[in-house]
């Protein structure tokens, strides 16, 4: 082979390989498979990272073969590089470098994803060198957005189609979340709109115009229809705002008076529509449409809005601790825990763990500081400036004798997309799908800056005109292949295997596998010792807590499972010692498994004090401490912890219920009744059998038999055909010393269910003997 890698004797092959893989990256939003844990996130993250790594292999060879494909500097590229540098610097000096770099299983981000996005940006800027190249790439992006929309619509009409998202009537598609889906489709919506507007301004073959126009028109309608039915208010308002900006721009640049009037009327309509919906909240049309109803019910009092404001206030408090450089990328959760706002806890179904502020300003500010935020703003400023200058220097596109404004494609469209993207990110956060499209737009801005006018653009690599012989040694290619293979394995393959086995364990739990099979899958997953292990250990702990609650394993096996979970969650505490979530998991495990070792209750108190230092205002910590104290019969201390939880936020009925249960356990019946009453006022209901059974259990262990009788009477009223409740009522009457009523309840149980008759007779005979 003469020391040369002759099978790669043409740069044309390398050009095509890079281009094909860059196009393939656009399919990231469609990537999903149920064999993974967090399938809607992990599938996309792994797909994108792998595609970028493979493309980078060919790109490295390409740039050595043809220097013109090498990365080129621009103000946009410099701004993006500065932001990335600030993120890395803030993370090095931040709270948890490992998490900053690798991210976690649930979000799939971290600096590692930012590095892949940076490489993606470089390759896009190096390979796509003409407006024609970019136009083709955007048509591909629009087509994939079209497929995503078609999937989401099909899923809404055929519930069994595709992957379940648990989002009810809100469209979620393969992205898996309505808000994330809407954020992604905003890009393809406005790309399609811009290309459609340009289509009829540029000379082209008529049938091509018609076919392209039909496709773009359908894509626009489907994209907007899906965005509307995601019921994502921020994204919908962003879309309307984008339409308004487009209309304003059209009116300002047009010399046609009628067009100016039409544009102004359209802007008024767009701005008036949300206001009309809000003021018309009582109209039947608004009430009957879920999306319009969500817009009409926007208020400072609704749960989502109120929670957002609490999170933003907390973000500002935490940001001030590390104002310049922040706490480090992906470390928002640690800041949030330190200043946890008790008001976000409304009930047991409330979202209590936030790893994002749901606002790009606070997300960037908290994690990368004011320096990072300014660097982030600089990206938009440089991109907007580059795009505007590109448009302002472009020649007019004339399709007829009528005056036409300059191409929307060449600047204003992308500025509007950036504005729409930024606005919707004031209420949500990015995923790999929206990150991907944002970087595509930035790469287009980089191209715009490097190529001031279309006439100055370099020849397209897609033309196939180049055929320069590549003289790269076989050893160099082989070495590069080894390096890339190493990266693919350690960055992706190990994560795929770890995630797959974790998903198998979770699926096995749902399908009723034997415990040993489930445990072995967890052990295989954790053996890869990679970045998802903290989430996987947490999932293991949650499974074991459920097993302890249901007592669904033999005691020896349950003890074994508990020890396994305790060992793994303790590893989390050592690896991520600032994350209070793992302390709470360990406290819950100790509280739920004290039958195996009573000393575990003492450990709850020890761990709880550390947890309180990390998150002093989180009610759940006080609940766990209170439970441990009550189990150790330290009633005064237990009640004090439950009281503290109520003081932090007295709105949730759970806080009053827990305090009432503590009073009941301590024999303070009157105080317990007062708290039960307060719990009722806040939503607790005696119409729930589960709630009543909890009270009955507490009454029994505290030997408050009158309360036990009272509770089982309510249960028999709630479910008069439930023989088991009458049987337990009979036992309660016996404990309370009322044998006559105990016999009546036992007879009633036998009457309702014949299988209880024999047992009831034996019970009655025992009472008569006594």
Image (cartoon, helix red, strand yellow):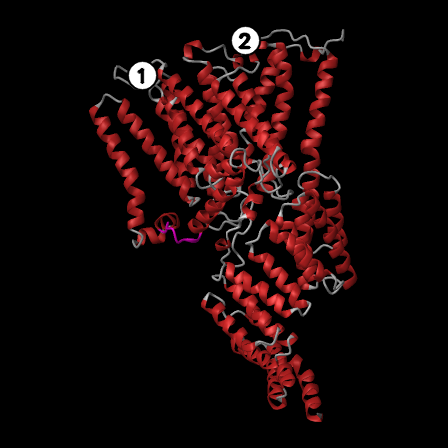
Drawn side of residue 55 relative to residue 168, left or right: right
The dot on residue 576 is none
Read off the magenta span.
297-303
Residue 207 locus on image (x, y percent): 38, 21
- Residue at the disc numbered 1: 399
> Furthest-right residue in view?
556
Where on the picture, by quarter, is residue 751?
bottom right
**SS assignment for the magenta stretch, majority:** loop
Camera-nearest residue between 107 and 602: 602
Where on the picture, by quarter, is residue 187?
top left
Q: CA distance from mark 1 to mark 2?
A: 30 Å
- Residue at the disc numbered 2: 465
Residue 721 locus on image (x, y percent): 56, 77
> Furthest-left residue in view?
257
Q: Residue at x 61, y 33 (%)?
A: 93
| Disc 1 residue crowd, few under 14, some 14–19, many 20+, Cα 10 Å | some
Query: Circle 1 sits in a helix, a strand or a loop, which is it?
Result: loop
Answer whether residue 47 is visible to the viewer in this image. Answer: no
Label located before the other in sequence (1 or 2)? 1
Q: Residue at x 70, y 50 (%)?
A: 569
| Disc 2 residue crowd, few under 14, some 14–19, many 20+, Cα 10 Å | few
Residue 129 locus on image (x, y percent): 49, 15
């Amino acid at each position: 082979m003469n020391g040369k890698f002759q099978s790669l004797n043409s740069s044309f092959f390398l050009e095509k390989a890079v281009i094909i893989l860059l196009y393939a990256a656009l399919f990231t939003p469609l990537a999903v498979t149920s064999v993974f844990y967090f399938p809607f996130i992990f599938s996309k993250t792994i797909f994108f990272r792998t595609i970028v790594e493979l493309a980078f292999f060919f790109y490295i060879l390409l740039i050595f073969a043809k220097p013109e494909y090498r990365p080129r500097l621009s103000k946009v590229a410099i701004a993006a590089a500065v932001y990335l540098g600030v993120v890395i610097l803030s993370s090095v000096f931040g709270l948890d470098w490992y998490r900053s770099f690798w991210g976690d299983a649930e979000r799939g981000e971290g600096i590692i994803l930012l590095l892949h996005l940076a490489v993606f940006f470089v390759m896009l800027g190096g390979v796509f060198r003409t407006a024609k190249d970019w136009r083709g790439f955007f048509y591909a992006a629009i087509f994939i957005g079209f497929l995503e929309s078609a999937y989401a619509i099909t899923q809404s009409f055929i519930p069994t189609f595709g992957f379940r998202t648990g989002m009810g009537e809100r469209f979620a598609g393969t992205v898996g979340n309505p808000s994330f889906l809407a954020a992604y489709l905003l890009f393809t919506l406005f790309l399609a709109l811009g290309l459609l507007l340009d289509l009829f301004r540029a000379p082209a073959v008529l049938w091509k115009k018609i076919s392209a126009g039909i496709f773009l028109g359908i894509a626009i309608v489907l994209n907007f229809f899906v965005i509307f039915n995601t019921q994502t208010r921020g994204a919908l308002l962003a879309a309307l705002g984008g339409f308004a900006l487009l209309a304003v721009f059209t009116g300002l640049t047009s010399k046609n008076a009628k067009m100016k009037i039409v544009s102004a009327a359209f802007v008024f309509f767009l701005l008036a529509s949300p206001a009309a919906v809000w003021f018309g909240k009582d109209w039947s049309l608004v009430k009957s449409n879920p999306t319009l109803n969500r817009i009409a019910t926007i208020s400072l009092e609704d749960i989502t809005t109120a929670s957002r404001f609490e999170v933003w206030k907390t973000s500002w408090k935490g940001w001030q601790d590390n104002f310049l450089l922040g706490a480090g990328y992906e470390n928002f959760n640690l800041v949030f825990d330190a200043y946890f706002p008790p008001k976000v806890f409304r009930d047991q179904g409330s979202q209590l763990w936030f790893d994002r502020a749901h606002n790009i300003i606070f997300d960037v500010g908290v994690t990368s500081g004011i320096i990072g935020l300014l660097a982030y703003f600089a990206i938009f400023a440089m991109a907007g400036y580059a795009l505007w200058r590109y448009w302002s220097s472009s020649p007019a596109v004339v399709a007829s004798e009528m005056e036409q404004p300059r191409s929307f494609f060449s600047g204003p469209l992308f500025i509007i997309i950036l504005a729409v993207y930024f606005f919707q990110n004031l209420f949500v956060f990015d995923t790999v799908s929206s990150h991907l499209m944002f970087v595509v737009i930035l790469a287009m801005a980089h191209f715009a800056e490097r190529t001031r006018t279309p006439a100055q653009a370099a020849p397209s690599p897609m033309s196939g005109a180049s055929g320069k012989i590549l003289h790269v040694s076989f050893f160099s290619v082989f070495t590069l292949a080894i390096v890339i293979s190493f990266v693919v394995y350690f960055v992706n393959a190990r994560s795929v295997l770890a995630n797959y086995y974790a998903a198998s364990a979770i699926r096995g739990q749902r399908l009723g596998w034997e415990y040993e099979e489930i445990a072995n899958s967890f052990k295989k997953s954790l053996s890869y010792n990679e970045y998802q292990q903290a989430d996987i250990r947490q999932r293991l702990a949650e499974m074991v807590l459920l097993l302890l609650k249901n007592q669904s394993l033999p005691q020896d096996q349950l003890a074994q499972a508990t020890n396994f979970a305790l060992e793994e969650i303790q590893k989390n505490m050592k690896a991520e010692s600032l994350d209070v979530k793992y302390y709470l998991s360990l406290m819950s495990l100790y509280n739920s498994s004290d039958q195996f070792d009573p000393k575990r209750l003492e450990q709850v108190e020890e761990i709880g004090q550390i947890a309180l230092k990390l998150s002093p205002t989180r009610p759940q910590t006080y609940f766990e401490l209170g439970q441990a104290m009550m189990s150790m019969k330290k009633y005064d201390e237990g009640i004090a912890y439950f009281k503290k939880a109520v003081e932090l936020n007295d709105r949730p009925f759970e806080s009053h219920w827990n305090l009432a249960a503590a009073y009941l356990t301590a024999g303070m019946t009157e105080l317990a009744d007062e708290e039960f009453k307060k719990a009722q006022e806040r939503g607790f209901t005696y119409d729930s059998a589960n709630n009543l059974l909890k009270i009955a259990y507490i009454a029994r262990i505290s030997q408050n038999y009158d309360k036990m009788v009272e509770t089982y009477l309510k249960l028999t009223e709630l479910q008069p055909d439930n023989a088991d409740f009458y049987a337990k009522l009979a036992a309660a009457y016996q404990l309370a010393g009322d044998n006559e009523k105990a016999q009546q309840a036992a007879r009633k149980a036998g009457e309702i269910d014949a299988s209880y008759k024999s047992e009831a007779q034996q019970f009655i005979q025992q009472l008569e003997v006594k």
